[in-house]
Amino acid sequence: MSYFEKIIGNHALKERLTRDIRNNSLSHAYIIEGPRGSGRHTIALTAASAIACLNNDTSDTVPCGKCINCRKIAEGHSPDVKIISLEEDKSTIGIEAIREIKNDIYIAPNDLKVKVYIIDDADKLTVQAQNAFLLSLEEPPHYVLFFIICENSSLLLETVKSRAPILRTERISDRELERYLLSQDKRAVELRDQSSDDFKTLIRISAGSIGYALELLDSRRRKAVFDCRRVATDIISILSSPNRSKVFETVVSMGSKRQEISRQIVFLQYAIRDLILLKKSDEASLCFFEDRENAAELATHFTSKQLIDLYDATVTALEDLEHNTNVRLTLISMMQNANLI
Ligand SMILES: [Zn+2]
C-alpha cells in the first residue's frame, strides 16, 4: 500500500504523515511550512483524504481518489473540510475568522470521522487572532485536525508552534517538476512540442514551484513574465558591453506600471545573483541563465563589488517603487546608485 502517490517530492514529509496515519498517532495539528506554490495546500487536502478515505485499509494507493469521501474532499464539497484563508484586499487574518472556528469545532463532523481545518496563510494571522486560536488548539475535540500553512513559521507565536509539529515542504527538482507537468497538463506537452526552449525557461523560472509552473502554462501569463525576463537580460547585456550608458535608454522605456517594473527588477536580481555566484564558483547552481557558458562570460565583465552594488541598487529601487515615487526617477537612480557608469 502506498500513501500520497500523487504528491511529488517531499519524501520526509510524506513519510511522517504516512507513519502518523498508519499508527493512528496523528497530532491534532500540523504546521506545513514552505514557499507558495510548493504544494502545501495540496498536501493538507491529500492528508485529509487519506484519513477519511473509505478504502484506506484495502486500496493500493491511499487516498484512493475514488470513494465518496475522497471525491467530496477533492471537489471541495465536504462540509467537514474547512478552509480559512486571507481575504482578497486584506493583508492580515483577524480574530473574526478564528471565532468562527471556535464556535464550529464543537459541532461533530457531518459524514467524515474527522473535521479538518486548513488555515492558509497562517503567518498572516494577527497576534490577537493567534492568541484566540490557542484556545482551540490547546484541547480540541478528538475528531479535529488543523493544518496550519505558512511561508515562515517564525511569524507564529511560540505557543502556537509548540503545539504542532512543523513539516517543511522541499523544493522539488526541475526534473520532478518537468515530469509532473508533462503527466498532468496537456498544455505542458503542447508547449514542449512547440518550443522546447520556452518549456525549459518555464521550468527554470518556476524554481520548483508547481503552483507557479501551472500559472505559467497559461500563454498570456507566460508571455508577460517572459517579456519581463527579457528586459533583465537586455540590461545585463548592455551593462557588459563597452557602451554602458545606453542602459538609460532601456530603463526609461521599461514601462509605467509599477507591478510590471517590479517584476522586471526582480528578474534582474536573479540574473545578478547568478553572476555573483559564478564569480565564486563555476559550479554555482543558476536560477536565471540557461546557458552557463554565456553567463560565465557575462560575469567576466564585472567585478564582484560592481555586481553587489548593482544588486543593492535594485533592492533600493524595489523599496522606492512601493512608496509611490516617480517611476522614471527610481529607475535612473537605480543605475546611478550602481556606480557602473
Ligand atoms: Zn478514498
Image (tube, rainbow, N blue to C red):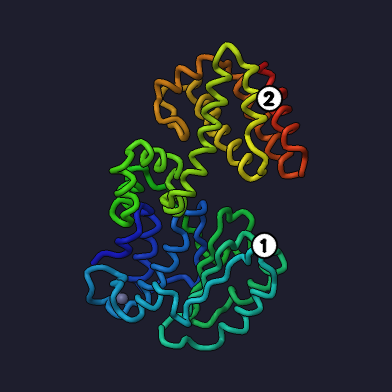
Residue at image coords 51%, 76%: 82
| Quadrant showing the N terminus | bottom left
User: Which labelled disc corresponds to residue 100?
Assistant: none
Residue at image coords 50%, 19%: 299
Q: Quadrant of residue 104?
A: bottom right
| Quadrant showing the C terminus | top right
The spot of residue 279 in percent (x, y) is: 50, 20
Q: Amino acid at mark 1?
A: Asp
For residue 283, above or below residue 96: above
Give neighbour class at mark 1: few <14, some 14-19, many 20+ (Cα, 10 Å): few
* Marks 1 and 2 close (CB-CB < 8 Å): no
Gap in angstroms between the C-alphas marked 1 and 2:
33 Å
Q: Is residue 336 visible?
A: yes
Q: Amino acid at mark 2?
A: Met
Residue at image coords 39%, 47%: 172
**Of 29 and 82, the residue lying toward us:** 82
Q: Which element carries disc 2, helix, strand or loop?
A: helix
- Point out the tag, 1 or 2, that comes first from the N-terminus: 1
In the visual, does 134 lie left or right of 37?
right
Q: Is residue 210 visible?
A: no
Judged from the image, the quadrant occupied by ligand 1 is bottom left
Q: Residue furthest top?
A: 242
The spot of residue 184 in percent (x, y) is: 31, 57
Q: Which element carries disc 1, helix, strand or loop?
A: loop
Give neighbour class at mark 2: few <14, some 14-19, many 20+ (Cα, 10 Å): many
Q: Which residue is mark 1?
A: 89
User: Which labelled disc corresponds to residue 335?
Assistant: 2
The spot of residue 213 in percent (x, y) is: 43, 49
Q: Quadrant of residue 106?
A: bottom right
The spot of residue 90 in percent (x, y) is: 68, 63
